[in-house]
Amino acid sequence: MSSRIFQGIILQMKDATDRCIGVVDDRGSVVACSELSMIGTRLEDFHGALGDYPDQVFTSNLRTYKPVSGPNAHLDYAVFVDGKDNTARCVCLLASVAFQEAKINYEEKHNKTIFVKNIISDNILPGDIYIRAKELHFSADVPRVVFLIRQLDHTEVSALETLSNMFPDRQKDFVLSINENDLVLIKELPSLQENDQEVYDIAESIEAKLRTELNVGCVIGISTAAKHLRVLAAKYKEAQIAIDVGKVFDTEKSIIHYDNLGIGRLIYQLPTTLCEMFLNEVFKRNPIESLDQETLYTINKFFENNLNVSETSRKLFVHRNTLVYRLEKIKKLTGLDLRQFDHAIIFKVALMVKKYLNSQKKEA
């Protein structure tokens, strides 16, 4: 397909110069040329002159060449122009720029992966999504789930290839590199049900693969199902939010589903000024910082055991009366009796709000 693009540009450039212009592949075979009889022939001077200059303009005894590298730094193709003077060099460089732009534009128009990446990056107008999907024979209304895979501690370039090999169907599943740390899998799941275990199984298989083969730790955010392509960008944001909220409120989890964020999602969307006002209102007597680590540990254990005094004291290996004494101490300091359900809810939310504020200060 690229040869047709190149040939079209060459025909447009033919009237601007009397030099022979063409393109060779990585084997030196002519794939497009202003001299039609040369197409399919091999230029023996190409590899001999290439030498140690894979990305720079170079000359042979007959021609000037400008190599162009592909995504893996391997030679993709090279532009050539007859002659080795300054005119040949200028024509060669100009032709190279024109070919590259045309190739990029063609791939963006006809490549499904680039199309999907443009959707989640908001680089395409909503009204154009359906039209472009139709041009690409792309099913627009098949349920899809977005998995955002964020590499932790250190990153591996080969993680993209590993993930691509796990999901090889390039027509239905799309693996994208977003930045140095983040990869995205957009997985087509036609039979997906609400809270389907299948999405967790997929996430667990990804996590295990990266850990065992590449020794890479990761956290994975999962979106709710996208029923149409036009909402894919919103689902990508859901996966981002799942990771952002999870790292504040569920630090022990490595797989977080947007649908299971609970009250953490609500707190995450509140302005910090409102959160600070809430804490000041709850802790009028003493700030939350007045509670030492042992007291906070006792409180968390009390919540974990559903406000059950006997069970909590057993888990803490303390006498029941000792726990009651600690709860009374908390009541005197804060004015909140954790044995009362309403007070316990307020305190629980306050702890989450404080955790959120601390995370915001770290990022600032």
Image (cartoon, grey):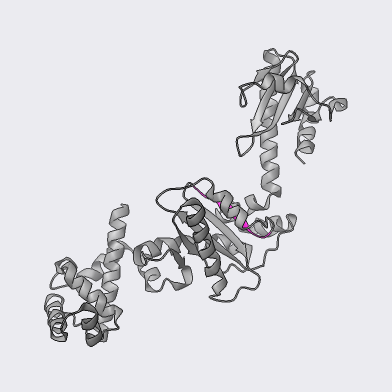
Residue in the image at 22% along x and 72% along y: 297
Q: Is residue 345 left or right of residue 218?
A: left
Residue 340 seen from this side: no
- Give above or below for 236 relative to 314: above
- Give above or below for 280 relative to 29: below
Q: Quadrant of residue 349?
A: bottom left
| Residue 327 is inside the magenta segment | no
Q: Quadrant of the N terminus?
A: top right
Residue in the image at 46% along x and 52% along y: 215
* Residue 237 horizontal/vertical position (percent): 49, 60
Residue in the image at 13% along x and 86% along y: 321
- Give above or below for 232 relative to 41: below
* Residue 6 horizontal/vertical position (percent): 76, 34
Q: Nearer the viewer, residue 218 or 144?
A: 218
Q: Quadrant of residue 294?
A: bottom left
* Residue 222 horizontal/vertical position (percent): 50, 65
Q: Is residue 303 left or right of residue 128?
A: left
* Residue 255 horizontal/vertical position (percent): 46, 65
- Residue located farthest toward the front when viewing the structure as drawn: 212
Q: Nearer the viewer, residue 238 or 275?
A: 238
- Give above or below for 154 relative to 5: below
Residue 167 seen from this side: yes
Which segment is the magenta one? 172-179
Residue in the image at 25% along x and 85% along y: 311
Q: Nearer the viewer, residue 185 or 166?
A: 166
Q: Is residue 173 left or right of residue 184?
A: right
